[in-house]
Image (cartoon, rainbow, N blue to C red):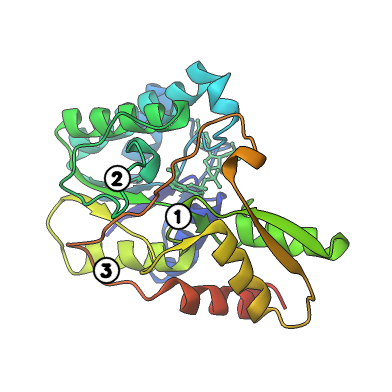
Amino acid sequence: MILVIVGSKGMLGSMLGSVFAEYKPLLLDRDEIDITNSDSVRAVLRAANATHVINAAAYTNVDDAETHKEDAFLVNEMGVKNLSEVAKELSATLIHFSTDYVFPGTSVDGYSETDSPGPAVNEYGNSKLAGERALKESGCNFYLVRTAWLYGPNGKNFVDTMLQLAQTKKNLSVVEDQVGSPTFTKDVATYIKTLIIEQYPFGIYHAVNSGKASWFEFAQKIFEYMQNMPVIVKPVSSAEFPRIAKRPAFSILQNTKGPQVRVWQEALREYLTLFAR
Ligand SMILES: NC(=O)c1ccc[n+]([C@@H]2O[C@H](COP(=O)([O-])OP(=O)(O)OC[C@H]3O[C@@H](n4cnc5c(N)ncnc54)[C@H](OP(=O)(O)O)[C@@H]3O)[C@@H](O)[C@H]2O)c1
């Protein structure tokens, strides 16, 4: 396997680099490749003679995407089109990530891999949905892996934000009417490794930690595990915490066909032990 990881400095990309280290992947980020430029993508992937490309590069600023729609689509749609076309030319397998935001977020039970996505909940979701379509239309061999509520080292995430806020505040208000599956990047990277090594069939997969929680319950669990932080977490509604981009009420992704993933509480405990103490 000649593996290329694109977006290797991001939160998920950096974890993929660690989990796949034994395969000596070629690690690429903005300085080495611009996925919005087809010439750049073709030159780099051809020179590497890639057999597997993992795309962890994306425009991920959900609120900015509302006002920078073209930028979001350039990376999340055109970037995926470029990568998937070159993957097809090379007969390489493309592993690409998408999000629960491609769904409307109104289903209490969440969404399975066979549910049709759309309408997306916001512009970031629209751009990721356009990327999913570009991938499917390319005809390359792909794993389209949707994930959600990610946290891990090397990225802005909810766990680190809570821990930082707790340095200066004793009371934190956290939204209780949005539910999802908090997911550790390590578990997504391990999931991808299993898909590739065990040669799961190509197609759509949902990679999230098992179980569900509201942001409020997630925050409560963080401070339950961080016993030395005497923080009081108060539940609030989304209406009391306005954001630029709309967020879904239900972010749950059902994993009905991929490798099983441990419960989110267990993953969170490991993350806090490894990275927060
Ligand atoms: N984070 C979540 O909660 C979450 C939830 C669901 C799905 N996802 C999906 O999971 C994947 C990984 O997300 P993440 O949070 O790990 O992302 P991230 O931390 O924002 O990392 C993305 C990386 O891609 C790079 N990049 C952006 N545009 C590029 C371009 N044109 N060419 C090359 N590299 C470029 C970024 O560089 P710069 O930093 O310089 O821009 C960054 O290093 C994405 O597909 C995302 O949509 C994430």
Estimate the x, y position of residue 64 in percent, counting from the top left. 60, 27
Question: Could you tell me if the residues under marks 3 and 2 are in contact, i.e. CB atoms within 8 Å?
Answer: no
Disc 2, SS? loop
Q: CA distance from mark 1 to mark 2?
A: 42 Å
Is 93 placed left or right of 55 in the picture? Answer: left
Q: CA distance from mark 1 to mark 3?
A: 27 Å
Disc 3, SS? helix
Q: CA distance from mark 3 to mark 2?
A: 22 Å
Among numbered discs 3 and 2, the one appearing first in the sequence: 2
Q: Residue at x 47, y 37 (%)?
A: 58
The three-letter code of the residue at mark 1 reads Val
Task: Tell me: residue 46, above or below residue 220.
Answer: above
Residue 103 in which image quadrant: top left
Quadrant location of the N terminus in the rendered image = bottom left
Which label sits in the foreground, 1 or 2? 1
The three-letter code of the residue at mark 2 reads Asn
* Residue under label 2: 49
Is 41 placed left or right of 50 in the picture? Answer: right
The single residue placed furthest to the right in the displayed view is 168
Q: Is mark 1 within 8 Å of ligand 1?
A: no
The three-letter code of the residue at mark 3 reads Thr
The disc label shown at residue 179, or none: 1
Q: Residue at x 39, y 39 (%)?
A: 101
* Residue under label 3: 194
Estimate the x, y position of residue 168 in percent, counting from the top left. 87, 60
